[in-house]
Image: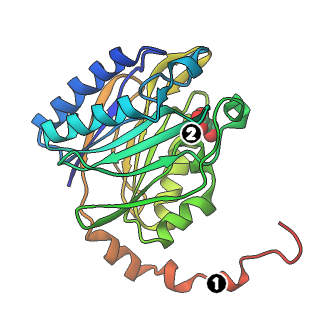
Amino acid sequence: MKISLIQFPIVPGDRLANFDQVRRRVQQAARAGSDMAVLPELWDLSFYPPDVYDLADEEGRQAQAFLQDLAASCHIQLIGGSIVRRHDGCLYNTTYIVDEEGNRVSSYDKCHLFTPGGEEKVFAPGDHLNTFFLGDIPMASITCYDLRFGEWVRMAALAGAQILFVPAAWPHPRLAHWQILNRARAIENQFFVVAVNSCGTCGDYRFCGHSMIIDPWGEVLAQGGDGEEIVTGEIDLSVIKDIRSRINVFRDRRPELYHLEGKR
Ligand SMILES: O=C(O)CCC(=O)C(=O)O
C-alpha cells in the first residue's frame, strides 16, 4: 500500500488557493502510483485566521464536494486532514475520509482541543472515536493534540485499527515531541502511524513539517523535512501479526488494574 503525505504551507484564510494546492499535489501523488493521500490539519484555512467564523465551511459542504470529486477523478483514497466546519452556529475541526470511488466513509471532530493555543474558545469538541474501513483494512484517525492522549489512541488500537492517521498543525519548538509521541504511539499500539504535518506559518505559529510514516516496531519508514514536500512510503500490514506474536502486549495487558480507586 503506497501512501503520500501532502505537507504544504497552507495559505491562512484562502480556501480556493488551498484547494488548488491540494488538487495539484494529490494529482501528482496519484500519477506517482499512490493508493492514498493524507492531508494536514485545517488544510482549508490554516490554524486559524482571525475571521475564521465567517470563513468557515457550512456543514463542510465545500470540502466534502471537493474531496469526493478529487478522490473519484484520481481514483485515490483521501484522509482529508481537517477543515473548519460550521454546524448550528458552532465551529468544529473536522476530518473527512473518502474512498477511491468518491464515497464519504466517515468523519471526525477533533476531541482534545489545544487549550494552550485557545482552540477551545473557537471550536467545539467532538465526542467520538473515528474508526473506519478502507477496503478491508481497519483504520482510525485522530487530530494533532489528540496525539498526547495515549488513552484515546489506545481505544483506536483496541477497536482494531491497523493504521492510525494523525493530521496535524504542530508547531516549533516542539518538533521532538511530535517525533517521539508519534513513534511511541506506534510502538505501544503495535500499529502503523501515518502523521502529516503542515509547514510554513500562520500568525505566531511556525509549523514544523516532518510528516512521518512509522511501522509498528517504531521504525521511521519515511520522513519529511521542514518545508513543502510530498512524503511517500509503502507499508506492509503483514508485519503487525509478526510483531504482536513476538511481544504480545494485547494479550498481556491487565485492564482490570487500570483504574484509580476513588481518584481520577
Ligand atoms: O500538542 C502540541 O504541542 C501541539 C498541538 C497543536 O498545535 C494542536 O492541536 O493544534
Give the residue drawn at x 39%, y 63%.
216
Q: Dividing the image into four equal quarters, which quarter contains ligand 1? A: top right
Give the residue drawn at x 41%, y 38%.
81
Dot 2 or dot 1, earlier in sequence: 2
Asked if residue 224 shows in the view, the reply is no
Image position, residue 200 (x, y; %): 46, 18
Secondary structure at numbered mark 2: helix
Q: How packed is label 2: few (under 14 Cα within 10 Å), some, or many (20 or more)?
A: few
Quadrant containing the C terminus in the rendered view: bottom right
Secondary structure at numbered mark 1: loop
Quadrant containing the N terminus in the rendered view: bottom left
Give the residue drawn at x 65%, y 39%.
124
Image position, residue 26 (x, y; %): 22, 32
Return the residue at label 2. 176
In this view, 35 is above or below 25: below
> How many angstroms separate mark 2 from mark 1 (CA)?
30 Å
Looking at numbered disc 1 in the image, what kind of residue is underneath it?
Arg
Asked if residue 39 shows in the view, the reply is yes
Image position, residue 121 (x, y; %): 72, 30
**Mark 2 touching mark 1, by CB under 8 A?**
no
Return the residue at label 1. 254
- Which residue is at the far right? 262
Mark whose residue sits in front, 2 or 1: 1
